[in-house]
Amino acid sequence: MALGNLSLTYQHLGQWSAAEKSISDGLVLLREDQNQEKSLQQPQAEQRSLQVLAQLHDIEGRLELERGRPQAALTRWQQAAAAYTQLDDPAKLWQSRINMAQAQQALGRYRQARSMLLEAKTQLASQSDSILKATGLRSLGNVFRVVGDLQLSQQALEESLAIMTQVSDAQNTQDQVSTRLSLGRTLRAQGEIYQALALFQSAANSTDSLELQTQAQLQELSLRVANQELAAAEALWPQLVSQIKQLPSGRTAIYASVFLSEILAQLETANASGAIRQSSSSSRESAQLLAASIQQAKYLGDLRAESLALGALGKIYEKSQQQADAIDLTQKALLLSQSLDLPDLSYQWQWQLGRLQQSEGEIEASIASYSDAVNNLQTLRQDLATLNPEVQFSFRDKVEPVYRELVSLLLLAPDGIPPSQAQLQQARTVLESLKIAELENYFRSACLDATETIDKVVDQQDSNAAVLYPVVLKDRLALILKIPRQEQLEFFSTEVSQGTFEETVNQLQVSLPDITRVSKVKQSSQQVYDWLIRPIEQTLAANEIDTLTFALDGPLRNIPMAVLYDQQRQQYLVEKYAIALAPSLQLVTPKPLKKVPLNVLAAGINEQRIVEGREFAPLSNVSNELSQIDTQLSNSQNLINQRFTVKNLTSTLRAKPFSIVHIATHGEFSSSLDNTYLLTWNQLLKGNELATLLQQSDDDQNGIELLVLSACQTAVGDERATLGLAGIAVQAGARSTLATLWSIDDQSTSVLMSQFYQALKAGQTKAEALRTAQLAALDQDRRPYLWAPYVLVGNWL
């Protein structure tokens, strides 16, 4: 036991060889003792030896984890757990399971760790408050944060901190500081910037642990850079460089160096357009720290940490345009990550190598590297959270650009030569993969099944529907068009800078919900029409296309395509085509609306409500809207006002299958699953809860054909808000969703919905029925505010 404690001391000092020798000597000595006890038949002594063995395995697990060998750490803690099971020591057993969950996290297996900790939490709940219980809750809170369950993370961490404060006589113990640091990271992820900053500063100022102080200040620096507090960031980073140099050699120091280099790169980018001139020494300091980290990782034998530090140093050289050194370092990092089969690192270095090759004019090599990166991302579908949270993983920063930059490369037209069919097909496949990845990131799980035979399905079901993929590139808008019964893809390109295009689309989005800005809507929408539709007009006419399905990209997702205006013919796009949106065509299986009587469950609220501290204005036309549905479709059922509760909705859906679910209430679509909701009488129904509720049957015959969400809107200023709309549609299993991009409470809504259901009843497709209803509304009032917000997502037949 003394040798074990000596190993712990060496670990704190960063003397890894000595720590390893001490634990090894302790285990050898113990085994000799155990053999002697067995020969002398001393059962009590054997029990004591088993207890010491379990403790030595605990210490050995810590050593393995710190040296970058999480799989070995997991094995040691499993051995410790087995010993504690034999000893019937539940408290120590659950401590071992908490340790095992930490090893699972280090291996990127966050969901396994979450499952393990939830089981531990259930067991610990029955125990009295203790540091052990609080530590387990902290681990659980950390895992919840990584997998995106931020509210559960906050609850677990606040409970952990409360228990620690209650059971400990001392203030600001290391455990308390660690928990405040974890809570700060969760609050930051929730957008509670100033609360998080206060916790980081409190953690840094109340501990004498250099490691914890450094971790807290790194989080503070990262937050200040993200919040554009550049002067404060400039004052803080030199202190962190000094502290990291003083940390004991080990994984903590290496990861701190990598994290700091990431933050300083972001600071450099922020300062490039700001008033503050960054010290030229920051890149040099980062490079020196990373060079030392590479040597530390080699000494430790931690190949993952070595790959991470090599790649980070390569990125610094990339930014300083030292291409040869950057390529050399990146290739070394890639070889290490590939030798360890670490796709979460390999894709980053392949992406980095692809950028470097492109800058050197090696386009084919660059495409190959980017393609390898995307393939590795595809293998990570089951758990995108495997990307290391310690280097501030973000889908939008570290996943989405890989797909987009590869598409841009594939559509690059050197010397005016258009992309080949192979490049167009690959570009479309990459775009489809990106859209699926976006939705899975939104859901926080790999829950979507794609089909690879989508062209055949579309061709067989609708020979007059074309699919358009607009791709916003830096200097132009690229258009990939799929014409039915035609194997080859059509390619078009419009010269317009990304900035000009996005500014025009954003102006259109801002103007649309304002009924008084008709002229501004026309002005912006005709410009977008000229960029997006004008180049393909002749092809559409030649192929007798009557339905356009859009797989939209970027800011285009938040405007209705129906409103695009053809100035030459003085007509809106909806006057030419039926229109639908596809979050990903691989997720849409076009099937005609079943030739059965349409039965509708209609629900809504027309009264003013205050729910969960938020006030919602009355929707005076909802009653008329629902009564129109009753008139049009005799086989319908209503839940209005007090009757529209989650409980009633659930029981009604379970009682019998409905082909259409129509909900007329306040709601908002957001790029955050937690901020997507619908208003019921007494609560806000979150997007994931609604999706679960609507999954009434896995039987394809009983699935919801159409989900109608009336009077909802997209979140203001959220360019990916329609992910919420697409997310609800896909996860609920509804073949189609009809929704509004902005809320209008007007008599026109009930009239339009009445026309829509009449057309459906007459046998039109969903896209045709929506067009019929919009044209009827347009004939009465041409102001887009009243008829344009309705969009159809998913199966258009």
Image: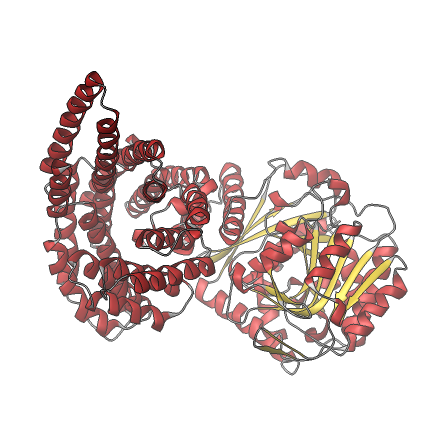
Residue in front for this viewpoint, 513 or 418: 513
Query: In this rendering, is residue 778 above or below 13?
Result: below
The colour scheme applied to this rendered structure is secondary structure
Residue 499, quarter of the rendered image: bottom left
Query: In this rendering, is residue 534 above or below 310?
Result: below
**Which residue is situated farthest in the bottom direction here?**
516
Query: In this rendering, is residue 685 above or below 518?
Result: above
Residue 53, quarter of the rendered image: top left
Residue 688, quarter of the rendered image: bottom right
Quarter placement of the N terminus: top left
Q: x, y (%) of residue 721?
A: 55, 63
Residue in front for this viewpoint, 576 or 10: 10
Query: In this rendering, is residue 247 above or below 32?
Result: below
Residue in front for this viewpoint, 647 or 41: 41
Relative placement, left or right, of 181 versus 635 is: left
Relative placement, left or right, of 48 versus 562 is: left
**In this orientation, does residue 779 appear?**
no
Q: Residue at x 73, y 59 (%)?
A: 649
Q: Residue at x 25, y 69 (%)?
A: 202
Q: x, y (%) of residue 286?
A: 17, 55
Relative placement, left or right, of 288 versus 731 is: left
Q: x, y (%) of residue 7?
A: 13, 39
Q: x, y (%) of residue 787?
A: 72, 71
